[in-house]
Image: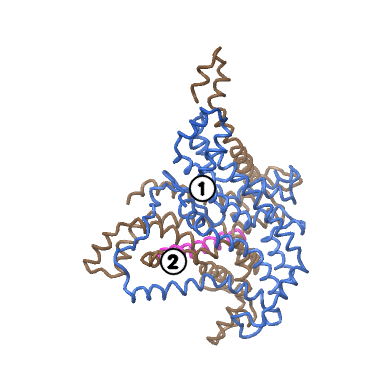
Amino acid sequence: MTTTAERAPGAPRRGVRFWRRYGAGYLFVLPSMVFFVLFMFLPLGWSFVISFQRSGLAQSSWIGLDNYVSLLNDPVFGQAAFNTVLYSVVTVAVWVLVSMVLATLIHPLPPRLRTFFRAAYYLPSVTSAVFVALVWRWVFNANPWGLANYVLSLFGAGPLGFLSDPSPFLGANVALWSVILSSVLTIPAVGVVLYSAALSAVPRDLYEAAEVEGAGAIAKFRHITIPLLKPITLYVAVIYTIAAFEVFERVYVMTGGGPGYATNTIVYLIWRTGFRFGEYGLASAQAFLLFIVIATISLIQFRALRSDVEY
Amino acid sequence: MATPTSSGVSVRSPREVPVLVPVEMLPVVGGATNASGRPLRRRERLAILAILVPVAIIGLFPMYWMVTTALTPSSAAIRVPPSLVPLDASTENLAELFRQAPILLWAFNSLVIAVAIMVCHVVFDSMAGYAFAKKRFPGKNLMFLLIVSSLMVPVEVTLVPRFILVTRLGLDDNLLGVILPSIADVFGIFLMRQFIRTLPTELEEAARVDGANEWHVFWRIIMPLSRPAVATVAIFSFVGAWNAFLWPLIVLSKRELLTLPVGVALLQQEFSTNIGLQMAGAAVGAIPTIVLFLFFQRQFLEGVRVGGVKG
């Protein structure tokens, strides 16, 4: 196909030749490229510009670094950052561990049971986080008929205002821990599927040799499974960390960031600042700080993967 | 379903941000073999099931509790102790839901948005994937790198400029305003590129010799051959768009224009004490994707493994 233009009679001009040769390729990527420029890269740069402005829908003016300075001195932003980090650290740690253990347990089962459990674990995650969070809000209902409070009453405790109680608890507050608990009790489906796939590729003879040596299930898990799965663990940890940093629906539905600012997270704050109060400049500055964190995590992932793909 | 990849894989985090990973670290599943090769003893299998079954029950419980509460008349839902089975099951809540909210309209809006985004992804992602896989043109690698690097940009950082853009186009509070900023995505482009790379080039060449133009080659040769990958892209795009929350929440405000997740979240604010109504709304929103999952389990799990998504 690339030679037709060169052979054409009358030797067409360079532009025409170039077009005949490569035009189709450009046309095929055109819609996507227009999309990415218009809705990803242009907004990214634009957002950076806005973050140095006092900006709303109506007018805007340059204020230099004021947005960033006020954010760094703002206790509300500080709390949102703290909440986001605590939420991420706890949920990611649990999700990674749970998905690795579940995949390891599923692995030796007969194929039909394996398929069944993978499907059962995956099913809840095909629904919107909004609907699931609504159920958790109902479970954590502050009244004695809320399911969580009923369970507490069986132990002679409660009732507790799970989502409405800002009193200090384990370095944070009750409401935030309730939100975290609801996440921790969600099965990390993607992790289970990815670990399952990785386990299928672990050479069998390693386990056979270990069994000959008399290694038990725990020893095999510690000394074979965990080290071999290190690359996939890094990968799962990164996608879950990014997801956790962007937690929004759960907070929006379960607590609305409250009581007070007790369960505010970064993305919830971005939404509130930008679209409740129309402070585009401040919201963009918040979003840019989030961008820096997430881009850093992604870069660490790329670097680590490049040096750590050897099995 | 085979969705081959030869050099990379993309996995979407729960907030729809795909992440790329060299495929070397996602090994191919090696058929239905047991880890150690030795069949499980009966006692071992029971011990494993004793862990996996309760975990599945915890994971599926929110879905169950949603449906149970939706079927329980409001007066009975606040009983102490809570009943784990729907006593006096009735469709009272559902009827109330239809009276109080334009739930069918919301479902229709969600459907329009999800189908439109799905079709756009299938067409535009495939076109770009085809060009990146099979075409040669100056700047190709740079463009691909650009698209892949957009994975590091959290969607939150683009929200404000996107909203200004959509508003200037006069598309705020319009379903088109939800659809337009999502007409292509990295996950689909990447998946299609990986799949199309494995297709033999002879068929295309033969078609060109027969006088087919570039579009015909793509639409009549490449697309039919790529059906498994197209199915994966279509399903994930549909479910992702159906479940999307943050962007529709920002763009849509007229009550009759909302999508199911946004509308149901609004119900929670309007009828904060009517749990049955909220759960009925959540069930209406959640059940379509659960049914889709039950029909297309293989595509879902294969998609997560090869190209991964929502968790």
* Residue type at the position of mark 2: Val
Where is residue A171 shown, x and y percent of the image? 52, 70
- Count residues near mark 1 (Cα–Cα under 10 Å), then give few for <14, some for 14-19, many for 20+: many
Q: Secondary structure at mark 2?
A: helix
Chain identifier, blue in the render: B
- Callout 2 crowding tier (Cα within 10 Å): few <14, some 14–19, many ≥20: some
Q: Residue at x 60, y 58 (%)?
A: A77
Q: Looking at this view, is B251 or A269 the one in front?
A: B251
| Residue found at the far left of this picture | A213
Taking depth in this image into account, of A48 and A130 the one nearest to the observer is A130
- In this view, the residue in front, B265 or B51, is B51
**Residue A101, how many percent across, how many down?**
40, 66
Q: Amino acid at mark 1?
A: Ala
Q: Residue at x 40, y 52 (%)?
A: B26
Residue identified by numbered label 1: B229
| Residue A89 is covered by the magenta coloring | yes
**Which of the 4 quarters of the picture holds residue A99?**
bottom left
Q: Secondary structure at mark 1?
A: helix
Does A216 appear above or below A68?
below
Tell me if residue A28 comes above or below residue B59 in the rendering.
Answer: above
| Magenta highlight on residue A87 | yes
Shown in brown, the chain is: A
Q: Which mark is residue A214?
A: none
Spatial CA distance of label 1 from label 2 is 30 Å
Residue B10 picture location, percent across and down: 48, 49
Is A201 on the left-hand or right-hand side of B292? left
- Start-end of magenta stretch: A76-102
